[in-house]
Each structure stands twice: as C-alpha cells, then as structure tokens.
Amino acid sequence: MPPRTNDHAPESGRDTGPAEPTGLSGPSAPSAPAKPAEPATPQGTTDTRPGTGDRADARTGTGTATRTEPEPGAGTRSEAAEAAARPESGTEAAGPGPEASPSGVRMAALRRFSAAACRSRGTHLTVCAALLAVAMTAGAVAVGGGRDGTQAGARTGADAAPAAGALTAGALAGGDLDAGVRALQSHLRSQPRDVGGWASLGLAYVEQARTNGDPSRYPQAERAFDRSLALGSGNEQALAGRAALAAARHDFSGALKYADRALQQNPYSERALSSRIDALVELGRYDEAAEAADTADSRRPGVPVFTRYAYVRELRGDVRTAREVLERALDGASAPADVAYVATALGQLAWNQGDYETALTHFARALAADEDYLPALEGRARAQAASGDRAGAIGTLEQVVVRSPLPGPLVALGELYEARGADGDRTKAADQYALVDAHAALARAGGVNSDLDTALAAADHGDPEAALRAARAEWDRRHSVHTADALAWALHRSGRSEEALPHARRATATGYRNAAFLHHRGMIERATGHDGDARRSLTAALELNPGFSPLGAREARAALDELEAAR
C-alpha cells in the first residue's frame, strides 16, 4: 500500500484542557488554565497509509508565509470577506482574496496534461476520454456537486447561519460538510470579523479537499486562515488550522512550525498535537515523534491521537503495541467516522503483515459504519487481490478511482490490469498511470508537494530519470523511511544501484515491517552482487506479505528462484 499519512484522519474536537489519562504513556499532564473552546472540525472520511502515498502503505519544505490582508472596517464587509463568504451556487466557490479561481487553475492544469497526453498518444482515445472525465469531474466538485450527483445546494439547511462554534459542532462534525461550508460562508457575510469563523471555514475547506480529492480548496483554506490571523493575530485555532493545511500539502516543516506556535497558545490543542506528530513522522524524526505521541496521549487522548500513537509504534517495529492501541481505540469509538477510520487502520496493519482474512474483517466493519469510506474500499481491494480474488479487487478499485483518482489506487489498479493481461489491459493500465501524472499536476496547482507520489509511480511505470529527480527533491526536504525507499528504488531503476544500496538499508533500519521496502532492498542487493543478502531480503518480503503487489511479488519470486538456482 502507499505510505500512510493521516491526511484523512477524523479531526479533533474541542480542546479545553487536559483529559483523563489512557495508560498508553503515563499520567496526564498537570492542569493548565482553561482555554477558550476550540470548535470541532469536520470528520474525515479517507485515509492512506505510508508506502503508497502514502505509495499507500501509509498513505505524506518550509512553511508558507501568512499573507496579511487589510481588516474590514467595523460594521462593513471587505471585498475579500464578501468573496470568501459567498455561498456556492452553480459557480466556483470563491475563497477570500482576488486571486485567480482555484478551480480555474485546477482545470488549466488538467487541460494542459490532457492536451499533452492526447498529442503523444493520439490513437489511444481512452486516455483522452479518461482525462476529460476527470477534468469535468473537477468542475463538478468545484461548484459543490453532491456525492450523489445532485447540487450540494439542494441539501436541507444549507442556508442556516448559526454562530461559528455551534455550526462547526453541528453541521460540520455531523457530517454534512458542504451544507456546513455554506452556512459558514453565510455567517461570515454578516459577521466578517469573526476570527473563529474564518478559522473554521479554513478547516472546512481543508476537509473538503481531502474528502473530495480536490486540492483547489487548499488555496481557499489558506486565504481563510490568513483572514483569521489578520483579525486575531496569533489565534491558536487558525495556527492549528495552518498546521493541518501544511501537512495536507506535504509541507511538513511548515506543519511543525505552525503546530508549535499553536501549542504555545494552548498546549492541549488536539489538532496541533496531532499535526505535530504527523510532521515529525514525515520528516523522519522518529524519536521526537514518539515523544510527541506520548505527550499527546497524556494531554488529549482520543481517536486522532491513538491512531498516530499506533503508527509511530508500527514504524519502530512494535506491531503488537500498534494493534493493541488500535483495538482499544476501536472499542471506544462510537461515531461512524471514528469506527470507519480505526477499523481501516487495523485492516491496513493486518494486510501489511499478510493476514488477509483479518484485514477483510476489519475493512468490512469499516464499510458497515460508512459504506462510502474510500480507504476501506481501497484496503478491501488490496486484500482481495492478495487473497486471489483479482476480479473482485479490480471491480472495487474501479469504484474507488471513479470517485477519487488518487495515485495509490490508480497504480494498484494499473498493476492489476497488467497482471491479468486480458485484451486491452495494457492500454487500461497505461491510462491509470497517465492519470497519476494528471493528479500530480492538479496537486501542484493546489500547492501540494507531490514528489513522493511521482517518484514511486514513475520509477515503475514511467520515466526513471523523472522518478529520480522527484525522489532527490523529496529527500532534500525530509529523510523518512518512505523517502529513503523511494530514492533507493529510483536510483536502482536509473542504473545507480551502488548509490541506492545505503538508502535501501536506511529504509529498513527502524524495524518497520514493509514487504515493498524489503523487495526493493533485495533487488538492489542482487544488482550489487550481495546475493546472500538479496535472498534474505526477498524471502522476508514474501514471507511477510506475499501479496504486497501483483507485479512486485511476481518480480521478487522470479529473482529469488534465479538466486536459488545459481547457488
């Protein structure tokens, strides 16, 4: 699976001070002065693991400087405030500020890529049709199309405009995200100096980007947070929101900076505590991430912290503790979004260890809580494929990519087409890989760093030199196990296996049990003449998770057979 990130974890609720200890990492922190309640944020609906994207095993710069806009006068509305609070109504949902429409940038990026793809593969009309479909879908998402194809404005209660705190705890946390965004926009048209309202709107835009796969929302979120900070300099809600936005854009240095600033204002901010863990993990600072997870557990125990705590333990090779923490989190989860998220994390953990029956059970529980939860559908497809149900896996992944064409499931579907090898499957696979490039262009237009996704996909299914450029750029930003693995594999695929070997060894040095990493290391060891090491690595990969990748597992078996025959 792709590298896991917590881009789609359930968001935190109110942060009012210390909570009861859980026993995960010791006693709770001492009492602190009460802080103003932080409005709950919308519940997430999708998550990826490191390794694919997270590739999605898991599915992962510097902070963006805040732009200060002039404050509107008392009792008046600025043009920026009017634009940001304008409800969606069949046109692009505008964010604050006079910048070009984010959906226009998004559409332009897709059109540029579509044109290039059509010119280079003129006879393959399916590619053009697929890209056009994505571009048209982009427009539908940008104007607020509902999940069932109806206009979001048709939903009940869209015009309500309660106070920002009440709104966030109700409409947003209750799951009707689009209606909640419209209510916030309406509220801010009449109350443009509401500091918390702007921060809540920014968080809602971040959540829309994540749940709809629409990076055009990220610039809108940035402008909303800027407005909040212009009205209330240093307010913790906006700072924590900027941390979440930076992490979603894979700007993990920026996420750490904003999280630390928010925690200076409120040490019990669950959102900031969670973003701080994410940032340290993705920067490869695992000892600090473990300390941050212990701190977060003592201050704000809950599903967002538990899942991060478990992942830190998994990255250090402590799968048993990771599983126990997730099981405890699932036992205590009641909201459908929490159940779906934690059950999916358990399913991903089981799949990573080759326990496909248990993985399918967890994914089924996640889908019982939320039948549309895309990470659970993707996880089920991977477990189906590993269990031998290729047809079921292809059918499930086709559902996923139609709704959210992200790199992890696109690559997985392409590889399943290649492995099946039926008439037309080679072209179908190429179409999926082309769409990975389209998504990367779209992500960049929304300010997202997509180099890791590019490196992983291009190394196997594109231009190895492009993969190497992307992997080196990502390695310059952060030294995580996932970037080490991506750089190692890109170097190997570019004919630089000797240079790749230290990075492949570094990727497996923390104790993290990942079959794809072991496969990459084994192939690099074989290419550099370390046959004994290669046999051990390839054997370990296939013993751990024999269905980790339809093409990768096949390559690992073939290489191992050749190594054994040469003994």
Image (spheres, rainbow, N blue to C red):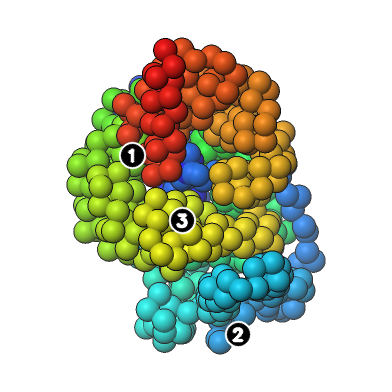
Query: Quadrant of the image for the C terminus?
Result: top left
Q: CA distance from mark 2 to mark 3?
A: 34 Å
Where residue 220 sits, quadrant-wise, is bottom right
Q: Position of residue 60 (x, y in %)?
A: 55, 43
Q: Secondary structure at mark 2?
A: loop
Residue 547's label in the rendered image is 1
What amino acid does circle 3 point to?
A: Gly
Q: CA distance from mark 1 to mark 3?
A: 15 Å
Residue pictured at 68% horizontal, 28% vertical: 496
Q: Position of residue 332 (x, y in %)?
A: 23, 43
Mark 2 vs mark 3, foreground winner is: 3
Q: Which residue is mark 3?
A: 414
Q: How packed is label 1: few (under 14 Cα within 10 Å), some, or many (20 or more)?
A: many
What amino acid does circle 2 point to?
A: Thr
Q: Earlier in the sequence, mark 2 or mark 3?
A: 2
Where residue 154 sits, quadrant-wise, is bottom left
Mark 1 vs mark 2, foreground winner is: 1
- Asked whether the viewer can see residue 62, the reply is yes
Q: Which residue is mark 2?
A: 91
Residue pictured at 60% horizontal, 19% vertical: 528
